[in-house]
Amino acid sequence: MTARAERRERTRRTLIAQSRRLFTSKGYAAVGLAEIVRESGVTKGALYHHFEGKADLFRAVLEEVQQEVAARVAAAAEAAGDPWSQLKAGCAAFVSAGADPEVQRIMLIDGPAVLGWNEWRAIDEATSARHLAEALTTLVEEGAIARQPVAPLARLLSGAMNEAVLWLAQSAGPDDLADTLAALSRLLESLRHPPTPSQGEAA
């Protein structure tokens, strides 16, 4: 990478980092381009060189947050043992990550409002939702979950977890996260296919 390309990339990263900080602390609607360029130490022309405007800059911030959450989910799943434990660990990691005020504001509150539901869903599909669908597909194929179409099940679970995280953003109880994770565990266990009796046991 040339020195000029490095400077461009550094400017882009600075704009994303400062915008992320401002969007998190104030919300998208309360942040103006003038404040972003001032806090980033760049000109408005430099901003428009990299982004079409504030919404485009927010999209880059949202994609970064989505990718970080997806990475946390994937890491938690990979650290677990069998595919069933991986599903539960990944889902718990998503809800725990969503309890972070930064994730709530960028990913779940401003994200759909700024970009619209369809574009927000497309970004979600490419990150966390894709991991969830892949995990469910494996469990259905292995018989750990009753054979069924994965797409509606993945969307139902994704919607439930997103709603839970939005509720956590407004809740004040010290045990609310733990209670939510316990409820999520019970919900997932209810999907588990009854184990096949071992040989020699009564069917």
Image (cartoon, rainbow, N blue to C red):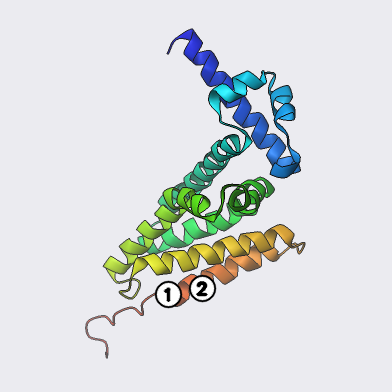
- Which mark, residue 163? none
Type of amino acid at the residue the image marks with label 1: Leu
Query: Residue drawn 58% across and 58% down?
Result: 95
Specify the farthest residue to the top: 3
Q: In front here: 102 or 173?
A: 102
Identify the element where label 1 is drawn: helix
Residue 30 falls in image quadrant: top right
From what the image shows, is residue 159 above or below residue 48?
below
Contact flag, marks 1 and 2 (Cβ < 8 Å): yes
Percent coordinates x, y for residue 3 in the rendering: 49, 8
Check disc 1: other Cα within 10 Å, few if <14, some if 14-19, many if 20+. few
Percent coordinates x, y for residue 200 in the rendering: 22, 85
From what the image shows, is residue 121 above or below residue 9?
below
Q: In front here: 15 or 83?
A: 15
Q: Where does label 2 land, which residue?
A: 187
Q: Where does label 1 land, which residue?
A: 191
